[in-house]
């Protein structure tokens, strides 16, 4: 299907089904129940799942295939965002041109950064990309204030009059897709359950599925094989007469364009951009996403992005009051003790929980969440094969 092998086609179909039915899967608990705290099926968070999934997929093309670890990918996310917001402010509120411009500008910036940074490898390459990202952040924060809005950032204002949009005086335009408002939602209820189907989420989800398909084609292509050769032994590859630089630069630019695409989609969902998107912590976050999910795997970065964004938005909202409600059935002393033990790992301390999870994955699952899933699959597969062997032995007549 679509030029993919059977396993890749199956994976793409599974990801598509999970993405389409995400509102149901992410809202498993009824509204009003104590467990509803863990529901993640609201539009803003679902949009973050797929957008940062795109960001992580692009980063994985560079890091997972070539082994070049970039600490500055947030710069391309920011450049893509600024390109998209200016396209909306000046030309049209339709998200398609904004997304296209975000990809183009991020790609051009990636050519410049990659051409310089790829002259070095290893930790020196990582430091160079980090330096470019921090310089970009500083420029956006203060030096280029007329273009970037400085500390306050940019957003659509009533005074903006895009050339191809008809807005009345004082009217604030909204991002749309050929007239369809990105914020529009449809709610479906059944008993105490409530599911929200958001226009912006499904547009971002379609883009994510296309991006995922393209990444599969890259992974399975001769180009992808050359990138794996770079990761395996770049020096030996050079000795054979093959110049690895064009391949690594191409991978870097493609990865930067993915980041720009994610930045453009962020603007399409929320028409506001700030320099914080280019800060070094944002670059470090995508590294964690790839490692948690499984570097070099197809679905791993998406799983890692979903896990981090879930913890950031769900675990961080749990406070002592919610904990006391959960453990109210216990004696007061035990209840207070349990809340005291859990308190450092929730709310503002969710980073501590993330750090522990990250350490556990690196130590026990070097292949990330994908390796964990594979181990579980082999465990059940081993039991199934053992049962089949026993059934076959039972049917074999004794001599």
Image (tube, rainbow, N blue to C red):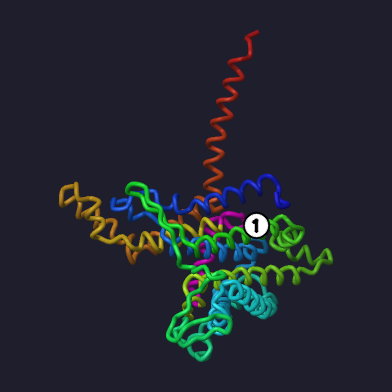
Q: Does the magenta stretch include residue 328?
A: no
Q: How crowded is mark 1: few (under 14 residues within 10 Å), some or many (20 or more)?
A: some
Relative side of 166 to 215, left or right: left
Q: Position of residue 27 (x, y in %)?
A: 40, 52
Quarter in which the C terminus is drawn:
top right
Residue under label 1: 213
Q: Which residue is drawn at 70% across and 77% down?
A: 119
159 vs 219, nearest the viewer: 159
**The magenta stretch spans residue 290:** yes
In screen coordinates, is 73 left or right of 38?
Answer: right
Q: Where is residue 131 in the image (x, y as percent from the top left)?
A: 57, 80
Figure label count: 1
Q: Nearer the viewer, residue 365 or 90?
A: 90
Instruction: Name the magenta segment's main secondary structure.
Output: helix
Q: Where is residue 303 in the image (x, y as percent from the top left)?
A: 52, 55
Tell me which residue sits at (68%, 75%) in the image. 118
Residue that lies at the very extreme toward the right in this rendered image: 241
- Write the residue at 61% across / 20% down: 392
Magenta part of the chain: 279-300
Tell me where residue 393 appears, x and y as whole percent: 60, 18
- Closer to the camera, 351 or 9? 9
> In the displayed structure, does residue 23 sit left or right of residue 385?
left
Q: What element carries label 1?
A: helix
């Amino acid at each position: 299907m679509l030029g993919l092998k059977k396993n890749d086609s199956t994976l793409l179909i599974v990801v598509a089904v999970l993405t389409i039915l995400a509102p149901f899967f992410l809202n498993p608990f009824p509204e009003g129940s104590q467990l509803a705290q863990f529901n993640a099926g609201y539009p803003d968070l679902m949009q973050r799942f797929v957008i940062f999934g795109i960001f992580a997929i692009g980063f994985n093309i560079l890091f997972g295939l070539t082994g070049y670890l970039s600490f500055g990918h947030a710069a391309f996310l920011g450049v893509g965002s600024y390109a998209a917001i200016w396209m909306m402010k000046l030309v049209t509120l339709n998200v398609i041109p904004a997304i296209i411009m975000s990809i183009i500008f991020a790609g051009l910036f990636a050519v410049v950064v990659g051409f310089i940074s790829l002259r070095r490898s290893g930790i020196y390459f990582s430091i160079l990309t980090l330096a470019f990202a921090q310089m970009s952040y500083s420029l956006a924060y203060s030096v280029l204030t007329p273009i970037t809005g400085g500390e306050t950032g940019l957003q659509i204002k009533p005074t903006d009059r895009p050339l191809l949009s008809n807005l009345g005086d004082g009217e604030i335009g909204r991002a749309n897709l050929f007239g369809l408002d990105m914020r529009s939602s449809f709610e479906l209820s059944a008993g105490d359950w409530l599911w929200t189907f958001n226009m912006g989420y499904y547009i971002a989800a379609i883009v994510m599925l296309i991006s995922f398909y393209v990444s599969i084609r890259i992974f399975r292509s001769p180009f992808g094989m050359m990138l794996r050769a770079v990761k395996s032994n770049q020096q030996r590859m050079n000795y054979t007469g093959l110049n690895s630089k064009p391949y690594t630069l191409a991978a870097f630019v493609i990865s930067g364009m993915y980041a720009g695409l994610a930045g453009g989609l962020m603007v399409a969902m929320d028409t506001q951009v700030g320099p914080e998107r280019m800060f070094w912590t944002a670059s470090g976050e995508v590294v964690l996403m790839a490692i948690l999910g499984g570097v070099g795997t197809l679905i791993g970065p998406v799983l890692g992005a979903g896990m981090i964004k879930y913890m950031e938005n769900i675990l961080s909202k749990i406070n002592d009051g919610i904990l006391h409600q959960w453990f109210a059935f216990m004696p007061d002393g035990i209840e207070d003790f349990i809340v005291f033990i859990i308190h450092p790992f929730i709310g503002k301390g969710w980073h501590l929980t993330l750090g522990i999870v990250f350490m556990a994955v690196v130590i026990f699952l070097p292949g990330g969440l994908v390796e964990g899933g594979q181990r579980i699959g082999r465990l059940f597969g081993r039991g199934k094969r053992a049962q089949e062997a026993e059934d076959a032995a039972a049917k074999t007549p004794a001599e």
